[in-house]
Amino acid sequence: IENQSIFHYKKNLQTVKMASTTMMMRSIARSSLAQTLRAKVAVPASSVGTLRFSSHFTAAHEYAKTDGKIATCGITDFAQAALGDIVFVDLPEVGDEFEKGDSFGSVESVKAASDVYAPVTGTVVEVNEALSDEPGIVNNSPEEEGWFIKIEMDDESELDDLMTPEAYKEHCESEAH
């Protein structure tokens, strides 16, 4: 009976330690994705050259891939590589409205929790529900299958303030060094 009691005690202690670690990770203050990436997280130089460029990019490593008035938004390959294994993505609801620069959600990885910002002003018309069950999709395909939201843009001229693929590539190369 003593061996069983010790076993249950150790098992309960291990469960408490795991729960404490999870709570500690959740309680880490959220920082913007840009702040996390400015911390000069080591990213292999080879990942910069293999980026799949979308149409428009922010300095904080969000993208807006446009098709007419619809912008598909998420984080770039550079961002997901810097964050590491993504374990949770918090997304808004369809119908929510955001101004350019507003936080529309967050992404949590094994390294950090970061807010994600709207690259353009508009209304959310679609949310990538698959990320709720499989947030790791963002690591595997950030700009294809791992998109976060689709926004119907209010003002397409806001895209002019974002970086082109070429400018974004230079931006990433300067941050990687």
Image (tube, rainbow, N blue to C red):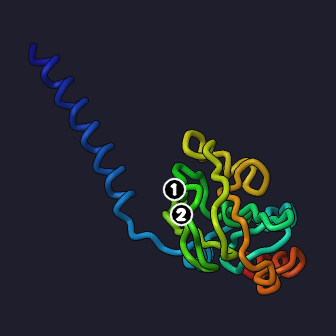
Label 1 crowding class (10 Å Cα cut-off): few <14, some 14-19, many 20+? some
**98 and 48: which is toward the camera:** 98
As drawn, the label of residue 90 is 1
Assign a secondary structure to mark 1. Answer: strand
Q: Residue at x 68, y 64 (%)?
A: 75
Q: Position of residue 22 (x, y in %)?
A: 36, 50
Residue 51 in sight: yes
As drawn, the label of residue 105 is 2
Quadrant where the image shows the C terminus = bottom right
Q: In this rendering, would 172 be left or right of 99? A: right
Label 2 crowding class (10 Å Cα cut-off): few <14, some 14-19, many 20+? some
Looking at the picture, which amino acid does disc 1 mark?
Answer: Asp
Assign a secondary structure to mark 2. Answer: strand
Residue 53 in sight: no
Q: In this rendering, would 127 be left or right of 78? A: left
In three-dimensional space, the C-alpha distance between marks 1 and 2, rounded to whole angstroms, equals 5 Å
Q: Are marks 1 and 2 in contact (CB under 8 Å)?
A: yes
As drawn, the label of residue 43 is none
Q: Residue at x 85, y 69 (%)?
A: 55
**45 and 101: which is toward the camera:** 101
Q: Position of residue 37 (x, y in %)?
A: 61, 74
Q: Position of residue 48 (x, y in %)?
A: 81, 67
- Residue furthest to the left in view is 2
Q: Position of residue 38 (x, y in %)?
A: 60, 79
> Which mark sits nearer the N-terminus, 1 or 2?
1
Up the image or down, 90 lies above or below 153; here it is above
